[in-house]
Amino acid sequence: MTYRILPEGTEVDLGQLSTAVRKTLGSKLARLEERPVAFGLRALIATVVMEDASGEGENVEASLGSLPGVSSVETQDVSLI
């Protein structure tokens, strides 16, 4: 699954947020990158590999959304390996 994590604003330290995302996702995290959104705002794009269990995607989304400095989390892509 791929998630777009939007910070609350341009003042959020994406380095610290990236560290928090890596800690939260642990071994599930396959890739994490920054992408520009608009007006200096950058989003984190997290690619996560996990079991195809009921509710697992929603749990990950909720965990990411509860991190300090996160405005919203959006599922961008879902695929099977």
Image: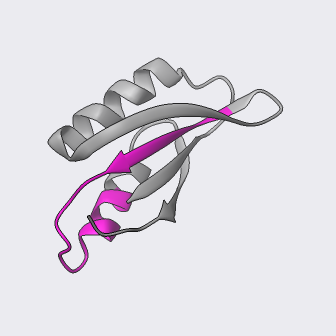
Viewer-nearest residue: 37 or 16: 37
Residue reaching furthest to the bottom: 54
Color scheme of the displayed model: one colour
The residue positioned farthest toward the right in the image shown: 39
The answer to whether 75 appears left or right of 30 in the picture is right
Residue 61 % position (x, y): 38, 59
Q: Is 21 within the magenta?
A: no
Q: Which region shows up in magenta? A: 42-62
- Residue 51 position in % (x across, y down): 16, 66
Instruction: State which quarter of the image contains the N terminus.
Output: bottom left
Q: Is residue 79 above or below residue 50?
A: below
x%, y% of residue 74?
53, 60
Where is residue 22? Give x, y as percent: 29, 33
**Residue at 37%, 68% in the rendered image:** 79
Seen in the image, is 17 located left or right of residue 21? right
Residue depicted at x 42% and y 44%: 46
User: Viewer-proximal residue, 43 or 17?
Assistant: 43
Q: Is residue 56 magenta?
A: yes
Image quadrant in which the C terminus is located = bottom left
